[in-house]
């Protein structure tokens, strides 16, 4: 006899999940094929792939894709390298390790808006403490937030400052879970620290590294608060990211159809990126298992 | 533990009883309605500017009517989306909203009409007609109440301009007396003269930040070269065809000037909003700025300023040549034509249709903006309220806060700007943010040196025309003409 009771428990939950995930997704997809604006209010009209074609033909869209990709690539690379290095240092029980561990994790616990406001003050071209440092070295009033490259560098600095602790936390947990006997055997074979890192630590932490990088990449692609507060996407649109662009279109101009198309392209982009990432890494990870 | 708990209960009960008695004891002042139990939710930008004025009016209204006022504050950039998303979702989130007149076309469908009895009082007649009959009206209906009079005026440092050594040095260099600039050319001469970065003083300061009221500063420059007295309402668009005028030679010259201002401003000025400019001026860092009247109230307030007693005011500079879009030529004038720009046009308050307490909400608006309350707000530095009533121009009121000379110059500049024959009105159009966002992006590119002034403005014009077509050229033209009083 089949047990029908399990359906009573499964279906309500399944329906809720469908309602809160699938429905908005389908609704957004439907909206992306319409010319729908709240301001000025225009009657919604199906225009097929019109929004997508307009997006692909827009210089601003490609600029935003480029900005976001460079931002993500540079900041996540730095976060991973620095985070892994600091985790290794903490794992080797340096003096005051507990204090460092707490201090390093603090930035991650702050809200991005507060962090952005804090750093905006730090980067103030006239009164900020960083200006004092640069002035001391003979380079007064650096254009931290007003010139393209500097603005980029400032945003990446803040992102790295805030999110490297996440990498430290994850990699440190990974390091602490590694079996000690392998390292002892390597030491008996007179393996150097570098050899042990390249031959044991790094390969064994590769699956964790892949997961950490993937999480950070997806999160970094969604950045909006820091950019909104610090540069507003400027100068011009030099630091405008994909989510900020979608925000401007959706919640400033209320161009809903167009914004839905941006959101969907963003989703497709992340899925494709994830697939490529996994295709490249999977053989490496399986080889190490 | 039990004793502590009992004690806590007793204190809580006493507190509730006391507040209940206090509420029960509240009696409306004579002649005022009783709004006991009514809470009016007011949307405002983050204080102190405007929010503090709405609170001052709210405290006074609460005493008079026993109603309550709750001010809900949002950053300036978030106000418009907050209001529109609430209205579009049919939420009764606000009983009163405060907003820019430029947003009126987008918000008007959701706003209630002002009760006619509000328009039958002496206080109504006291409001300057530019606000009362133009900016408070949309499609023939009074949909809002001005709570702040806004236009740009020039501010200069009296102590610098009247320093005998500075005057002599200026005369030796430029062959003329150091006086308050009447034209933009003179403005840049004076700015250049006082621009001494090594001494920590800079020529001018204006707002240049995207999202920091930037484009209103640029519009003030542009008004001088494009607001032709013979072609009213043609500054932004050709009122007959709705073709964008933003890339004509007048606008290009204005942008070249605006870029020049950046070079004579303090470091980091590219990130300045209007609030930063008035802080720089009040901090004694620049010889001049032009801004809303807040620079006057902040700069003369000893608690907020390094230069109280030295804040001079005048009309923003004008021009002897203005671009004629019809003949496509520069017209020469024998005298300087001032085109004071009604930048922003002053904050407005309105009551959404969705409010469940419209009567109380309009009463609160009327009370907050009455002669007595608005006068207090107008002379309070940091309230964000500038004169908009005839009664606000009384010298007695201002001499409580400023020196007689400062008060005289401040009021004269405000009154003469408002009454100028060639006063330039701000743009009010459906889809306002879509237009200004395009402008802001290209302006910032030009300021950063990525594009020339002409390239940036050609791009703006082309995008504005596309937008107008998308929104409907005829309906946009009708809205634009109505907003310009044509």
Image (cartoon, coloured by chain):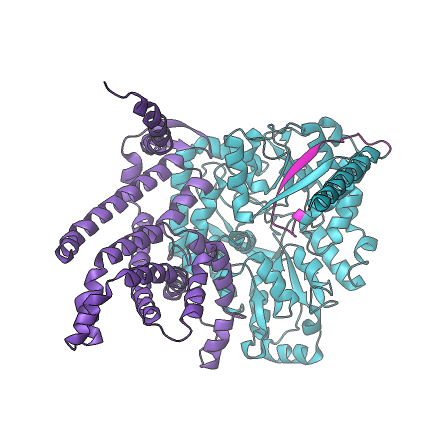
Chain colours: A purple, B cyan
Residue B264 vertical placement versus A22 (above, below) = below
* Magenta stretch, residue numbers: B30-51
Q: Quadrant of residue B283?
A: bottom right
The secondary structure making up most of the magenta span is loop
Q: Quadrant of residue B38?
A: top right
Spot occupied by residue B93 in the image (x, y as percentages of width and height): 58, 34
Spot occupied by residue B7 in the image (x, y as percentages of width and height): 74, 44
Q: Is residue A163 magenta?
A: no
B255 on left or right of B362 = left
Residue A92 vertical placement versus B314 (above, below) = below
B22 on left or right of B191 = right
Residue A19 vertical placement versus A167 (above, below) = above
Spot occupied by residue A37 in the image (x, y as percentages of width and height): 42, 33
Residue in view at x 67 percent, y 77 percent: B167
Answer yes or no: is residue B277 visible: yes
Name of the residue lying farthest toward the right: B30
Answer yes or no: is residue B443 visible: no
B9 on left or right of A73 = right
């Amino acid at each position: 006899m089949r047990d029908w009771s399990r359906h009573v428990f499964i279906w309500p939950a399944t329906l809720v999940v469908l309602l809160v995930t699938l429905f908005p997704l389908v609704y957004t997809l439907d909206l992306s094929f319409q010319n729908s604006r709240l301001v000025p209010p225009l009657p919604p009209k199906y225009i097929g792939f019109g929004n997508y074609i307009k997006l692909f033909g827009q210089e601003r869209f490609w600029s935003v894709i480029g900005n976001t990709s460079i931002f993500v690539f540079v900041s996540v690379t730095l976060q991973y390298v620095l985070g892994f290095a600091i985790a290794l240092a903490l794992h080797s029980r340096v003096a005051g390790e507990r204090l460092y561990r707490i201090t390093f994790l603090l930035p991650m616990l702050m809200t991005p808006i507060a962090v952005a406001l804090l750093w905006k003050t730090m980067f103030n071209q006239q009164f900020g403490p960083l200006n004092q440092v640069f002035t001391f070295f003979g380079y007064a009033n650096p254009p931290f937030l007003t010139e393209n490259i500097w603005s980029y560098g400032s945003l990446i600095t803040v992102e790295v400052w805030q999110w490297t602790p996440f990498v430290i936390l994850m990699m440190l947990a990974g390091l602490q879970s590694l079996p000690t006997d392998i390292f002892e055997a390597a030491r008996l074979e007179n393996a150097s620290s570098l050899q042990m890192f390249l031959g044991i630590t790094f390969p064994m932490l590769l699956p964790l590294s892949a997961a950490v990088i993937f999480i950070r990449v997806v999160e970094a692609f969604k950045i909006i608060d820091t950019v909104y507060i610090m540069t507003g996407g400027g100068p011009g649109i030099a630091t405008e990211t994909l989510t900020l662009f979608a925000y401007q279109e959706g919640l400033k101009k209320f161009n809903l159809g167009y914004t839905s198309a941006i959101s969907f392209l963003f989703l497709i982009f992340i899925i494709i990126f994830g697939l490529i990432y996994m295709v490249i890494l999977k053989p490496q990870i399986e080889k190490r298992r | 533990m039990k004793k502590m708990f009992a004690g806590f209960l007793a204190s809580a009960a006493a507190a509730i009883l006391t507040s209940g008695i206090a509420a029960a004891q509240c009696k409306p002042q004579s002649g005022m309605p009783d709004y006991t139990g009514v809470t009016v939710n007011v949307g405002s930008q983050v204080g102190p500017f405007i929010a503090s004025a709405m609170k001052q009016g709210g405290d006074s209204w609460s005493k008079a009517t026993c109603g309550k006022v709750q001010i809900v504050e949002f950053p300036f950039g978030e106000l418009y989306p907050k209001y529109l998303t609430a209205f579009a979702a049919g939420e009764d989130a606000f009983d009163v909203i405060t907003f820019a007149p430029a947003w009126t076309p987008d918000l008007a469908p959701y706003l209630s009409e002002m009760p006619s009895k509000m328009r039958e009082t002496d206080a109504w007649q006291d409001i300057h007609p530019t606000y009362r009959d133009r900016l408070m009206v949309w499609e023939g209906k009074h949909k809002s109440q001005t709570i702040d009079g806004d236009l740009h005026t020039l501010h200069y440092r009296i102590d610098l301009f009247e320093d005998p050594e500075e005057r002599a040095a200026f005369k030796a260099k430029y062959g003329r007396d150091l006086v308050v600039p009447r034209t933009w050319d003179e403005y840049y001469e004076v700015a250049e003269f006082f621009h001494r970065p090594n001494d920590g003083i800079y020529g001018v300061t204006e707002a240049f930040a995207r999202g920091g009221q930037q484009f209103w500063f640029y519009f003030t420059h542009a008004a001088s070269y494009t607001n032709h007295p013979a072609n009213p309402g043609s500054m932004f668009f050709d009122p007959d065809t709705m073709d964008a005028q933003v890339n004509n030679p007048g606008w290009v010259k204005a942008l070249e000037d605006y870029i020049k201002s950046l070079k004579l401003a303090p470091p980091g000025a590219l990130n300045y909003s209007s609030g930063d400019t008035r802080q720089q001026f009040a901090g004694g860092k620049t010889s001049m700025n032009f801004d809303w009247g807040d620079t006057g109230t902040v700069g003369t307030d000893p608690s907020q300023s390094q230069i109280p007693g030295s804040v001079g005011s005048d009309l923003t500079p004008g021009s002897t040549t203005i671009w004629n879009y019809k003949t496509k030529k520069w017209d020469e004038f024998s005298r300087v034509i001032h085109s004071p720009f009604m930048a922003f046009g002053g904050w407005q308050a309105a009551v959404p249709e969705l409010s469940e307490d419209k009567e109380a909400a309009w009463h609160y608006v009327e009370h907050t903006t009455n002669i007595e309350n608005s006068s207090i707000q107008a002379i309070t530095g940091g309230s964000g309220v500038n004169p908009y009533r005839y009664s606000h121009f009384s010298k007695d009121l201002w001499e409580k806060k400023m020196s007689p000379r400062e008060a005289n110059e401040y009021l004269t500049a405000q009154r003469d700007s408002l009454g100028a024959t060639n006063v330039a009105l701000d743009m009010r159009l459906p889809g306002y943010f879509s237009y200004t966002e395009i402008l802001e992006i290209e302006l910032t590119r030009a300021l950063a040196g990525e594009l020339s002034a002409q390239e940036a403005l050609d791009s703006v014009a082309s995008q504005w025309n596309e937008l107008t077509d998308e929104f409907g050229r005829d309906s946009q033209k009708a809205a634009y003409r109505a907003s310009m009083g044509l």
